[in-house]
Image (cartoon, rainbow, N blue to C red):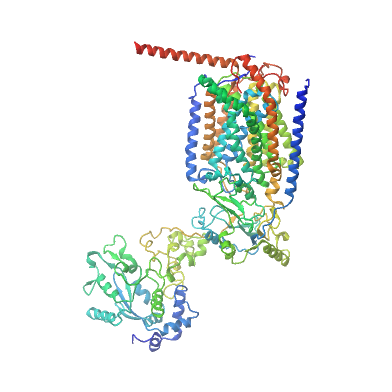
Amino acid sequence: MKDNWRRNVPVFNVPIWTRPFQVLCVLGGIGLVLVLYREIVGLGPVSGMNDAYAWGIWKTFNTMVLTGLGSGAFAIGIAAWIFRRNQLHIVMRTAILTSFLSYIFGLTMLGVDVGRPWNFYWIAFPWHWNLHSPLLEVAVCMSIYATIPLFLENIPTVLDYVYDRWPQQRLSVEKFEKVVVAGYPFVVGLAYVLPAMHQSSLGALMLLGGDRVSPLWQTPLLPFLYVWAAAFLGFGFVIAILLFCGIIWERPLDVDILSQLSRINAWLIGLWISARLIDLTFRGRIVAAFRPDFFAGLFWAEMMILGWAFWMSRSASVRRSPRGMFFGALLTCLGGMLYRFDPTTTAFQPRPGSIYFPSVIELLISIGFVSIGAAIFIILAKVLPVLPAPLSLWYEMEAQREKSSQVAAAAIRSAAGQFVA
Amino acid sequence: MEITRRDLLQRITTGSAAIAVSGAVSAATMTGLAHAEEPAKVPPRAVGMLYDATRCIGCQTCVVACTKANDLQPDNRRDPLHQAPGDLNYRTKTLIKLYKAADGKEFSFVKQQCMHCVDPACVSACMFGGLKKDSKSGVVTWNGKYCVGCRYCEVACPYNIPKFQWEGFNPRIVKCELCKDRLAQGEEPACTAVCPKKAVVFGTREELLKEAKLRIAQNPGKYFENRVFGEKEGGGTQVLYLSHVSFSAIGLPELGDESVPRKYLKWQRRLYSYLILPAGLYAVLVGSIRKNWKHHEEHMREEEQETGLRAQL
Amino acid sequence: MSNHATIEAHLKATGVSRRNFLQLCGTLMVTAPVGLALTSKKSVAQIAEAIGKTRRPSVIWLHFQDCTGCTETLLRTSTPDVAHLILDVISLDYHETLMAAAGAQAEAALHKAMIENSGKYVLVVEGSIPLKNDGRFYEMGSRPGAEVLKQAAGKAAAVIAMGSCASWGGVPSSDPNPTGAVGVDSVVSGKPIINLPGCPPNPYNLLAVVLEYVTMGKLPALDEYNRPKFAYDRVIHDNCPRRAHFDAGRFALAFGDESHRKGYCLYKLGCKGPVTHASCATRHFNEVPGVWPIGIGAPCVGCTEKDVVWKMSTFSTVPIHLVTPPDTYAPIYAKNGALKTGAAALVGIAAGAVTGAALMGARRLPKQALVPAGASETEIDKPGSEIPSGD
């Protein structure tokens, strides 16, 4: 019982400025400098995008795939709030923070990617919206979701921090919290409708690709499969993050909760795989999977990875082993990311004979933004009560804080003593 | 589990809400269905071009005329001595391409430019109306004031026509706009004006369609499938093609009679008609969360009492 | 021989056949297909009629720092009749190379011609005018060239700078320009100056300008370098007989090699045709078709362009200002995009780093299944379970 997660505790016993953090900062810095370069010279010289493939990894990976990974707040939130998996509330803060960061950086990448970002202000004038455009829906819902519900969902974490760190502010925190609590269900409701809309619209984007998207991916169910993939990607990524943070910062794991997450994840993947196979079979497109070509190979790679992930998350024995769950989660992420990436690039053939491969600068900018996101996550996890932990860790933190304040007080006393002497 | 009266009431409420929502959804879907049945209408004064591959001699005069009329910089990036673009690009709005069969027995030129679809995918894709179809002439034009540069039009266009300017910090989307400035002055597009063989001619869509069918009737067996490409293909286009080789050989895709946006966004449009479904979903979610909120709060208070620490939301 | 007779009367008197005269008029029509009032007539006969009625124009021809090439181009026609014909149409009242007089006699002839036709004669200048050292590099009757030119131009109706030297200095002005050689327009002001650059220029351009002036009473439209547009508005490249080779990408690569002998485009040997405004491509020299630099396999040196000849290397290629399509075609599907090694390596490194981190991390996680700590799994997973979390 000792190790059960009951409280979100910052990573108090590790300094922020570590070697891996420095590496992330350097990568992020390189990315930002290259963004400046991109804004000056235009997209052609810096990217591998061309007249056939107008979209590159900034859209297809950083926005379309990584916001899938950032669907934890949406998927786990629904499980916790709607389907009353009450235990899962404890991991919501991790999910919300990762989602927030992946959305913010997804949107930023969108801003870097588009050629005329200054015209984006038209989004404030709904009568200029073309409601038939799936991309408009993505843009509108994603911006609103990231900046309002997702942002607001992070407020309790910050309030906790303020309450804990500035005792004199406690009264105003409590007052403010009442307002937050009153509005919370409405915000949370929005936080599930908006991602459901734009995650499905992300899938709808490639509908207009028509026959140029391989029949193994092109289906009227694409929006549904996309949002569903976002759901298991969200679960998989949160499991992976929780376990990875557990490893690097040596925090106790709660196998019960992780196992429960994996179990739900298994169901999500299983349903998704069957939905996809049923859809392909009913529309007769499944024959394309048995042609000896690249697309069939890609299709089976996706299905095998996700099938394996399903098996690992499903098996009761694997699910009680942290290492097994970790691999299951990683395979989920890999398979889901592949699925969401393929119809935009690898299984999309706008013109015969053309290919797209990202350029070095394009990759460095992409990696840079991911690094900045990771770096910010590291800072916030070490400052704010984000990661779940057992109660013992909380007491340990308080004890350490007490000790350090005593040391500081002693230091002040001795310094003062010296001064007086 | 024992069912209290309160629980029962709650379940009834949730159940009826769900039924109401699904009813609204199916109603919305039905109205959506009714909408989708009608094909897009051809604009009343739709103008266009008719290109006859059997007449074209590949002189590329149209390419030069287009460059001049639209103030484009001739594209000599592949070959500094010539205007020799490999494909349409932001410096090339029209281009003559050559199809040669692998066995060398069959060949054809083809002029590529915007098809000015009756129901254009690019316009459907465009977020704020940077690409617009004129309600009278049906010409699809670009307006930089509303263009974000997202390049979704390029992904959406089944003919791969709109091109993004890859260089510079103020890029444009470039595509044939049927020489809209010349049309406004009562002139015909530059390419049709200079064509020495009348391989590409300008006119209203109606006239052109009649002319194309006349040519087919007068020359039985000359044209591929005795078909005018663009009459129905992809919901119809305002630029029509006649060819002696198969349309797919000269790079025109087989699209079926339904327009791309109608065919592929049908369900999307139904689901979002009047935002009924999202609004209903929101109502259900908020209701459910508010209900579960109480459980959560109770649990938080318990936790607070047990640990003596302030509960975390 | 009277200067006051009409051209027609003069030709009859000297026994020139009407056929030859009509031929000359036809050549003029080819020389100036557009841009001259004189030649924009329906038929050659109409041109002949207009010219015939006109009085023979008086022309005074002065030499400065020149090679007499411009005079030679007027005289060296393959059929001597034509040279005579030209000299019959105009009244060349003073020309140092062609007249018998010399010394004081010649000086007197010049003065006589200038006084007799004062304000009416056309002054043709050949060669550049030196200005350094008070212009003493060239003297005529002990007077510096600039002084002679100013005096002669003062009484002329119009001044024609014949050849590149007279137009802007030409060869004598090439670096380091020891004599300070300049063109007519640097010396003469207040008179219409028409430049006919070329080394040498085509004599028909001179004839067309003179006849346009005397028959129609006006000067032809000029471009920014005062060159008559009818002859200088198109570049050699536009009408070059080798243009087809250019469009097909067939180039002569070395003098005397097979590609050169086959008559391929001379662009890569340094031909300045794409930037040189001149009519050489349509009006060849010496009455022999094909006799002009490109026609005999020599690249155009750009002699009518101030900034090209003697400024650029003869063998360097010029930029193509207005590129046009080649006679090759784009394929139906262009090939876009490429896989670059560096990018592929970077993807590999990134994927490797992520995989490595995941594997290293996984090694620190316990492999064996942990015994469930809390309540049994089935109980936890029941939806809506009232069991408080983590209890």
Q: Is residue A374 visible?
A: yes
Give coordinates of residue B277: x percent, y percent: 70, 39
Q: How many marks?
A: 0
Which part of the image, by quadrant, shows the N terminus of chain C? bottom left
Give coordinates of residue A331: x percent, y percent: 64, 30
> Extreme bottom residue here?
C13
Is residue B24 or residue C114 the one in the foreground?
A: B24
Q: Is residue C20 visible?
A: no
Is residue A3 or residue C301 the one in the foreground?
A: A3
Which part of the image, by quadrant, shows the C terminus of chain C? top right
Q: Can you say whether A161 is above or below A300 in the image?
A: above
Q: Can you say whether A383 is above or below C144 in the image?
A: above
Residue C314: quadrant of the picture: bottom left
Give coordinates of residue C156: x percent, y percent: 31, 76
Residue A273: quadrant of the picture: top right
Q: In the shown orientation, is residue C171 left or right of residue B284? A: left
Residue A219: quadrant of the picture: top right
Q: In the shown orientation, is residue C308 left or right of residue A34? A: left
Q: Can you say whether A139 is above or below C168 in the image?
A: above
Q: In the shown orientation, is residue B1 left or right of residue A264? A: right
Give coordinates of residue C63: x percent, y percent: 30, 73
